[in-house]
């Protein structure tokens, strides 16, 4: 049975700030700017949370389905580092506002930036089992960076957004190579979110862990799949992209250890097989578990795909768990993704200046995890709200009453 991604969409929030403005405003060392390979950073407004992101990413996919197709969705899995409750999964809210059938499993997974792949692989295994003929699954990875580590070099990359993927036996976007994967995991304290407003850890250790897991995952992949040649087997390579410099280092490591390419040849290979996947990542920043799938979307939308191509995917989550796997994209992938118009939606975002950006970060701090009662007013950022949300029918957060969240359509 063919299994994979039938449809995919990304939602990047209502506003962004230029990364160069953050460097200027925070007096950061500009020599470090080019290594990020990020130009813009998506910023969540106070009326946005992981639920609104997830629904706004998934709704265009769901709206394209017939009622019969919608009712085939038997599984909704969410993944996020930006939890809104210790017990209640945000999948319950998302399922409700999308109007899906009640004959559905709803739950959430967490493993830092690997969680989206964990959910994707779990959903794919359910479809491949064929225990429910022609069923579908909805996988959503959604995160919000609220406080954004102001003044640190992590701030320019920490962003907001959500990926929604419909998983089925009709893989128009990506067909998985079933059984072709390499996995690796071990306990390590590289990055974590011990408090709602705090993302912390050891950046150098995280980089080393990312590269170590990549090498172990790739080796495990080649043990399963004989005859793999890293240059010939994969037409493109997609990596989890906290920032472009890390992706470039990961590609360079694999090429040095598994090929005889010169430095210049490695650079050309990166430009040809990897750089296209950063097309949207440059426009958004790091969206955690959604990032590797944003990179997949960037590859498909930016390249002229005229034939089937096998691609590799590398997913890493701090803590840590990682996977290297592969699949097939085709001209059908490009046609399917074009319906979502991701570029057009990103271009509609409001451009923040530093004062507006800091104001929004301050507003976001008023309703972190655990808030019991709160009424969301847009008056403190009305111009931003009106620019992106007014009369567009997007989901926004309206209030929290006795911990229960209520949303409305803009």
Image: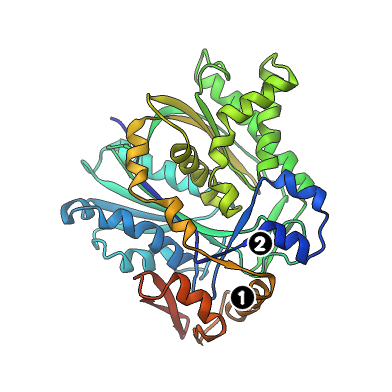
Query: Which of 176/234 is in front?
Result: 234
Q: Position of residue 279 (x, y in %)?
A: 54, 43
Q: Which mark is residue 193?
A: 2
Residue at 71%, 28% (x, y): give it: 253
Quadrant placement of the N terminus? top left
Q: Is residue 304 above or below residue 64?
A: above
Vertical order, 257 against 403 (above or below): above
Instruction: Say above or below: 132 vs 329.
Output: below
Could you tell which of marks 1 and 2 lies nearer the N-terminus? 2
Question: Residue 393 has which mark?
Answer: none
Quadrant of res 390: bottom left
Of the pair 136 and 308, the residue shown nearer to us: 308
Q: In screen coordinates, is 47 left or right of 189?
A: left
Marks 1 and 2 sit apart, C-alpha to C-alpha, by: 21 Å
Which residue is rendered at x = 48% and y = 68% of the image?
A: 87
Q: Based on the displayed image, in which of its 4 quarters is residue 51 positioned?
A: bottom left
Q: Is residue 120 left or right of residue 211?
A: left
Q: Quadrant of the C terminus?
A: bottom left
Q: Residues within 10 Å of mark 2 (few under 14, many from 20)?
A: few
Q: Position of 68 compared to 45: left or right?
A: left
Residue 26 in which image quadrant? bottom right
**Residue 111 is at least partly visible in this image:** no
Residue found 64% across the figure and 33% down from its top: 214
- SS for tag 1? helix
Q: Is residue 387 visible?
A: yes
- Residue 287: percent from the left, percent from the top? 56, 54
Crowding near the residue tagged with mark 1, few <14, some 14–19, many ≥20 C-alpha atoms within 10 Å? many
Residue found at the far left of this picture: 68
For mark 1, what is the residue?
360
Q: Nearer the viewer, mark 1 or mark 2?
A: 1
């Amino acid at each position: 049975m063919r299994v994979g991604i039938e449809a995919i969409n990304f939602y990047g929030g209502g506003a962004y700030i230029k990364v160069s403005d953050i460097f200027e405003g925070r007096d950061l060392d500009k020599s470090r700017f080019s290594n990020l390979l990020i130009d813009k950073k998506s910023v969540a407004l106070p009326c946005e949370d992981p639920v609104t992101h997830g629904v706004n990413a998934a709704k265009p996919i769901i709206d394209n389905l017939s009622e019969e197709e919608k009712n085939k969705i038997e599984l909704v899995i969410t993944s996020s580092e930006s939890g809104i409750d210790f017990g209640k999964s945000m999948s319950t809210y998302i399922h409700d506002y999308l109007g899906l059938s009640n004959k559905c499993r709803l739950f959430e997974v967490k493993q830092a930036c690997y969680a989206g792949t964990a959910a994707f692989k779990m959903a794919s295994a359910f479809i491949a089992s064929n225990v429910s003929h022609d069923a579908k699954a909805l996988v959503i990875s959604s995160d919000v960076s609220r406080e954004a580590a102001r003044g640190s070099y992590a701030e320019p990359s920490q962003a907001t957004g959500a990926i929604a993927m419909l998983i089925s036996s009709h893989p128009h976007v990506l067909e998985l190579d079933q059984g072709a994967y390499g996995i690796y995991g071990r306990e390590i304290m590289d990055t974590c979110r011990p408090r709602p407003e705090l993302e912390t850890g050891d950046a150098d250790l995280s980089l080393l862990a990312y590269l170590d897991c990549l090498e172990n995952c790739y080796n495990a992949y080649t043990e399963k799949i004989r005859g793999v040649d890293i240059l010939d087997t994969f037409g493109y390579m997609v990596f989890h992209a906290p920032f472009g410099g890390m992706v470039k280092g990961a590609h360079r490591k694999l090429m040095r250890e598994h090929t005889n390419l010169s430095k210049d040849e490695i650079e050309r290979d990166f430009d040809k097989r990897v750089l296209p996947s950063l097309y949207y990542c440059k426009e958004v920043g790091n969206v955690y578990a959604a990032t590797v799938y944003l990179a997949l979307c960037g590859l498909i939308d930016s390249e002229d795909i005229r034939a089937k191509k096998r691609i590799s995917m590398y997913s890493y989550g701090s803590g840590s768990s990682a996977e290297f796997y592969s699949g097939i994209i085709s001209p059908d992938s490009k046609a399917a993704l074009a319906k979502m118009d991701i570029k057009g939606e990103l271009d509609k975002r409001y451009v923040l200046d530093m004062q507006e950006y800091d104001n929004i970060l301050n507003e976001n701090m008023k309703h972190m995890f655990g808030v019991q009662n709160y009424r969301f007013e847009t008056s403190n950022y009305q111009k931003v709200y009106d620019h992106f949300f007014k009369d567009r029918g997007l989901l926004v957060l309206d209030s929290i009453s006795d911990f229960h969240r209520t949303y409305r359509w803009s």
